[in-house]
Image (cartoon, grey):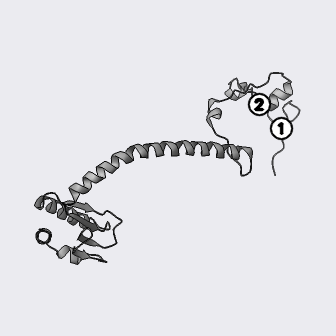
Amino acid sequence: MAPPKSKVDGEGKGKAVATTTPSTRVLRSMNRKTRSDTRRSGSSSKLVQLESPEKKKRKTKAKDGGAAATKLKKENEEEEEEEVTVKVEKEEEEHGEDDAAEEANEEDDSGKKKIVIEHCKQCKSFKERANQVKEGLEEAVPGIIVTVNPDKPRRGCLEIREEGGETFISLLGMKRPFTLMKELNMEEVIKDIVEKIK
């Protein structure tokens, strides 16, 4: 059981308890007025709300059937129409230049051989061998066009072929550790391809 409380006035037997003085420390929160404080005091000062410049820049979020949705749709359609007209004008300007350039390229490329190297991107050894063949062919045959992976390559594939014609090497569906490819002597492969091309 707890001991009885002592009385401060000296009526009881206990010792007098020292009263604590309020602290003189001033905090920032003491200066602030909350909404409830302003309502109690009845002050007529109203809070001033300033518009932020960001609100003007923001577009309103469009609800499914609201007026804002239709407004945004109209704006988007107008922007798309402007972009389409600009693109069409640019294409028409470039199209005339492209036709002349393509005809000139076709005349120049008719005598050149085109070689396609397709290599898998699964392992860097495919890329190293493809680059080695490309550099070797470009050095050995002047004016040859070698393209590497014009389309998305097949998995586990190393294929060297003439565009629209003969296939020189075709290793398809290889799995790790790619022994067929690693056993190839790429210098001999390059010599064989050069002989077949000439």
The residue lying toward the viewer, choosing from 22 and 130, is 130
**Residue carrying label 1:** 6
Q: Which mark is nearer the camera, 1 or 2?
A: 2
Q: For residue 81, which quarter of the picture?
A: top right
* Image coordinates for residue 188, horizontal then vertical, percent: 11, 71
Q: Residue at x 22, y 74 (%)?
A: 166
Which quarter of the image is occupied by the C terminus?
bottom left
Q: Are marks 1 and 2 in contact (CB under 8 Å)?
A: no
The answer to whether residue 27 of the structure is visible from this angle is: no
* Image coordinates for residue 12, horizontal then vertical, percent: 87, 35
Q: For residue 26, which quarter of the picture?
A: top right
Q: Is residue 56 above or below residue 81?
A: above
Q: For residue 122, which quarter of the picture?
A: bottom left
* Image coordinates for residue 196, horizontal then vertical, percent: 13, 72
Q: Secondary structure at mark 2?
A: loop
Q: Is residue 182 above or below residue 124?
A: below
Q: Is residue 150 left or right of residue 12?
A: left
Q: Is residue 79 above or below residue 19?
A: below
Label 2 amino acid? Thr
The disc label shown at residue 34, or none = 2
The residue lying toward the viewer, choosing from 194 and 126, is 194
Q: How many marks?
A: 2
Could you give the CA–CA distance between mark 1 and mark 2, rounded to whole angstroms? Answer: 40 Å
* Image coordinates for residue 137, horizontal then vertical, percent: 15, 63
Q: Is residue 18 left or right of residue 148?
A: right
The residue lying toward the viewer, choosing from 87 and 63, is 87
Label 1 amino acid? Ser
